[in-house]
């Protein structure tokens, strides 16, 4: 269906180009929204953020978080959610500077960091923590990006709210049983190693609330 | 092909139907009219095509305006997406499932990508009125590429003869040759319906929208409904519970009030008798629609509690109260906990 002309207020200049190229590239959603489930690619090392039911053998002993090269791994999906304090309605675009939680879909644990040492590089350990999406304040990360909202095409950084360290990969690889997977840790100071992009996934579009005028609906005009 | 089709009639909706009504009608009818499900009906393919065209026009603001003004003849271009595209945005890539089983599943040796199960948070307002959630699914799709690739790699024991009566067994990796495939990211919009009365944990599957498998078929994407807590209403089955605090005066002399329901309509409550703390008003038909039959609704149960005035009474006022209420002193002592 041709929706390129119907909703012009969704268009940004880059998106206008993808619209001209046809349906397979662009659809009407150029930003990441609350409730979306995404795979995050580390731009420099070309691996996706991943977790699984394997615990660190050192440090906190919590569930490990790694970077994997496989594109089609269902253990690489993370749900973008608000913090336990500030509710985030489904379909609302994530603003730059907003604090979020990233919940690992298959295990229900949140991306988490704390003052433990990572096993290979001795940076700050990043783990997956909590049960059924609920952990603690160390699960909170601030999205750092250039514009007003988190654009899907953009490489962004995730800053750990409590320690200010940035989610990164510097290339160290694990041996068995997770051979070839990269260590994910948090480091101070922005670099090429801490840039991430939202890739495959299921992105929630802003919904009109059934009432049309209640608090829950997000205004459809999003000229960012 | 008849070019004077009444699209509203085909979908069974009124001229003033909202986009949501149209999506809901399409989804319901598409399952019924799909040719695979009506193999004895020679007109099934046409009916299904008509349904697809009706949806395509009425769900698009521009096309609907043109159609309303000029009829089908007045529609500018030909139809874009195929009818299967429209169908798959509601149900997924492999189109069809009867009672949860995929067609052609005899050969269980075809490897399958992982299923993805996602929690979809819905509000009680959406459970009451229904809604459609549009999601954009970006996924890798297998595309043919030039050349060949190794597939079905496995370890095999090979026996080689070194000489008369001497053999050596070794393990070797043996692969087949398959057409080369590369994974290319594509995206499409899916329509997830939040049906009226939907319950927690109910799932809406989209066939083939899960993880791809380079040697086989993709898995499925399933949305699992999670109904969020509501600040005003509590759900129990099809019934809704809510609490209202009234003043002591209102409790004694009566009152009139409105409760704003999930879709904005007002539920009117009138009390002219005394309302005791814990009293309940039962409003039939003001609960949630039943999932299996939307015409049946549960009840709204309103429980009242009483807020006493803050100010203390002086002696005159105390006399006044005794005089008006004329209630004898009670002072009944009893065990209220009884084991709790």
Image (cartoon, coloured by chain):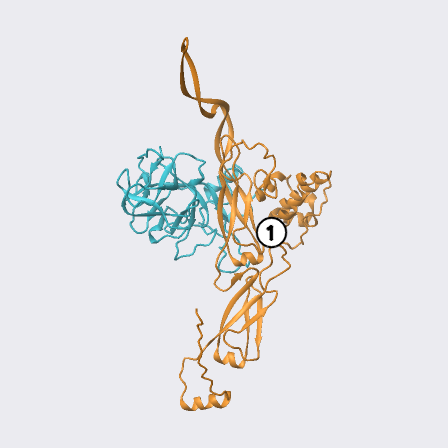
Chain colours: A cyan, B orange
For the N terminus of chain B, the quadrant is top right
Q: Nearer the viewer, residue B55 or B148?
A: B148
For the C terminus of chain B, the quadrant is bottom left
Residue, disc 1: B19
Q: Nearer the viewer, residue B192 or B109?
A: B109
A49 displayed left or right of B1: left
Image x and y of residue B219, in percent = 52, 38
Image x and y of residue B224, in percent = 51, 49
Which residue is found at the position 40% from the left and 88% from the top?
Answer: B314
Q: Chain of mark 1?
A: B
Residue B105 seen in the current view: yes
Which residue is found at the position 41% from the left and 80% from the top?
Answer: B310
Image x and y of residue B93, in percent = 57, 38
Image x and y of residue B160, in percent = 42, 14
The image quarter containing residue A50 is: top left
A160 displayed left or right of A6: left
């Amino acid at each position: 269906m041709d929706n390129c002309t119907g909703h012009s207020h969704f268009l940004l200049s880059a998106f206008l180009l993808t619209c001209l190229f046809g349906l397979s590239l662009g659809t009407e959603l150029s930003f990441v929204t609350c409730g979306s489930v995404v795979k995050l690619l580390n731009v420099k090392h070309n691996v996706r953020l991943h977790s699984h039911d394997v615990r660190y053998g050192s440090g906190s002993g919590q569930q490990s978080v790694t970077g994997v090269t496989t594109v089609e791994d269902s253990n690489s999906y993370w749900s973008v959610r608000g913090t336990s304090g500030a509710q985030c309605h489904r379909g609302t675009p994530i603003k730059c500077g907003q604090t979020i939680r990233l919940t690992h879909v298959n295990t229900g644990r949140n991306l988490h960091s704390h003052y433990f040492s990572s096993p290979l590089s001795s940076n700050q350990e990043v783990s997956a923590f909590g049960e059924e999406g609920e952990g603690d304040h160390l699960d909170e990360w601030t999205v750092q990006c250039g514009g007003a909202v988190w654009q899907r095409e953009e490489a962004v950084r995730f800053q750990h709210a409590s320690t200010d360290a940035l989610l990164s990969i510097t290339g160290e690889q694990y041996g068995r049983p997770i051979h070839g997977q990269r260590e994910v840790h948090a480091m101070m100071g922005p670099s090429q190693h801490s840039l991430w992009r939202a890739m495959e996934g299921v992105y929630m579009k802003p919904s009109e609330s059934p009432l049309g005028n209640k608090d829950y609906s997000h205004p459809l005009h999003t000229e960012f | 092909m008849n070019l004077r089709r009444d699209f509203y009639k085909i979908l069974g909706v009124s001229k003033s139907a909202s986009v949501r009504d149209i999506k809901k009608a399409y989804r319901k009818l598409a399952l019924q009219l799909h040719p695979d499900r009506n193999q004895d009906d020679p007109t099934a393919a046409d009916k299904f095509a008509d349904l697809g065209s009706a949806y395509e026009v009425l769900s698009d603001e521009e096309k609907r305006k043109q159609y309303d003004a000029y009829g089908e003849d007045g529609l500018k271009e030909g139809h874009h997406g195929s009818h299967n595209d429209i169908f798959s945005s509601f149900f997924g890539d492999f189109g069809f499932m009867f009672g949860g089983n995929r067609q052609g599943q005899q050969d269980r040796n075809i490897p399958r990508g992982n299923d993805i199960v996602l929690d979809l948070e819905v509000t009680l307002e959406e459970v009451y009125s229904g809604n459609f959630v549009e999601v954009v699914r970006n996924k890798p799709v297998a595309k043919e590429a030039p050349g060949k690739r190794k597939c079905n790699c496995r370890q095999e024991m090979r026996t080689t003869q070194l000489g008369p009566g001497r053999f050596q067994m070794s393990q070797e990796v043996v692969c087949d040759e398959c057409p080369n495939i590369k994974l290319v990211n594509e995206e499409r919009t899916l329509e997830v319906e939040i049906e009226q009365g939907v319950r927690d944990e109910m799932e809406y599957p989209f066939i083939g929208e899960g993880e791809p498998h380079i040697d086989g078929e993709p898995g499925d994407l399933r949305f699992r409904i999670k109904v969020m807590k509501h600040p005003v209403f509590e759900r129990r089955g099809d019934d809704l519970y809510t609490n209202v605090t009234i003043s002591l005066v209102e409790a004694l002399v009566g009152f009139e009030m409105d409760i704003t329901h999930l879709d904005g309509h007002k539920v009117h409550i009138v009390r002219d008798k005394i309302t005791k703390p814990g009293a309940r008003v039962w409003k039939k038909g003001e609960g949630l629609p039943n999932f299996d039959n939307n015409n049946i609704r549960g009840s709204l149960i309103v429980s009242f509690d009483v807020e006493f005035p803050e100010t203390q009474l002086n002696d005159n006022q105390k006399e006044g109260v005794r005089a008006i209420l004329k209630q004898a002193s009670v002072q009944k002592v009893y065990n209220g906990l009884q084991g709790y």
